[in-house]
Image: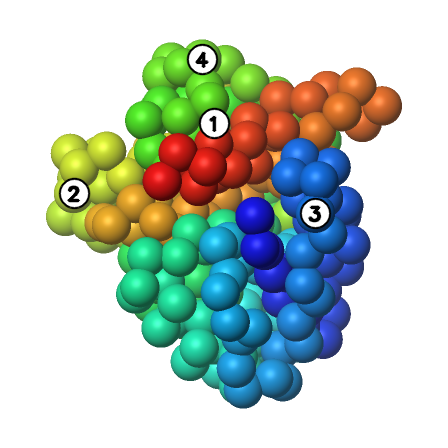
Amino acid sequence: MRAAVITFPGSNCDRDMAVAIEQVSGKPPIRVWHGDADLPDGLDFIALPGGFSYGDYLRSGAMAANSPIMRSLVAAAGRGVPLLGVCNGFQVLTESGLLPGALMRNAGQTFICRTVPLTVENGQSLFTRAYQAGETIHIPVAHHDGNYFADETTLDRLEGDGQVAFRYAQAVNGSQRDIAGILNAAGNVLGMMPHPERAIEAAHGGSDGRAVFESVLGALNAA
């Protein structure tokens, strides 16, 4: 798997993401700076990591969504390249229009940092096929602006088209319909607030996030 991890000013989970990808795939990903205009050729998988890009000025992910690399990234997603955005990466995906909705300030107005239970809503997507639909998994969260918002029409469409990938199994941040992660209509872009890269081995306290990366790797190997 030829993968890349994009780093923005203020990213702080890019190394965690790179380590997770290497541990699952056996190959270190290419590290790409946000100011680069072009992505490396032949990428099979791209990840946008968590952090506080541009210090969360304006809105979380808003400035990063206008970085030079984003034009190439949007084009890659349009070609069907799998794209995972975690936490701040999810915020960048919504701000860039690659995913619908927005991530707002947590309902409790506090930073949340703990492991939470999630329900796998779609067990057949590119990113979730190593899970079972309805399965409960435990993944860490660490965010201040993770409250997912979209209008009712969009929410109904996401639900009806199977684009809700993960749902919080208990109230966490005020997200509408407890949405924790969503897919684009084509199924090759996943944005999620919980951090699967922080749950890939027992030393992390659990390995429930590993299947996100195993799902992508398995899909690529089967193609």
Q: Is residue 142 visible?
A: no
Coordinates of residue 200 in the picture (x, y in percent): 70, 29
Label 2 vs label 3: CA separation? Answer: 37 Å
Q: Across the whole image, how many numbered discs are drawn on residues?
A: 4
Q: Nearer the viewer, mark 2 or mark 4?
A: 4
Q: Quadrant of the C terminus?
A: top left
Q: Position of residue 197 (x, y in %)?
A: 67, 39
Give the image location of residue 31, x and y in percent. Answer: 70, 66
Question: Which residue: 30% across, 45% down?
Answer: 187
Say whether disc 3 or disc 4 marks the residue closer to the N-terminus.
3
Which residue is labeled 1 in the image? 168
State yes or no: discs 2 and 4 in contact (Cβ < 8 Å): no
Q: Residues within 10 Å of mark 2 (few under 14, many from 20)?
A: few
User: For the residue carrying disc 1, how many other residues have a C-alpha within 10 Å: few (<14), some (14-19), or many (20+)?
Assistant: many
Which quadrant of the view contains residue 61?
bottom right
| Local crowd size for mark 3, using a 10 Å CA cut-off: few (<14), some (14–19), many (≥20) | some
Please tell me which of labels 1 and 4 falls first in the chain: 4
| Residue ID for mark 2 | 157
Mark number, residue 135: 4
Dot 2 lies on which element?
Answer: helix
Q: CA distance from mark 3 to mark 1?
A: 31 Å
Q: Which residue corresponds to the image point at 32% horizontal and 57% vertical from the top-left? A: 80
- Image mark for residue 27: 3
User: Of 214 and 201, which appears nearest the observer?
Assistant: 214
For residue 69, the mark is none
Q: CA distance from mark 3 to mark 4?
A: 29 Å
Q: Position of residue 146 (x, y in %)?
A: 53, 48
Instruction: Say what amino acid the circle numbered 4 marks.
Output: Glu
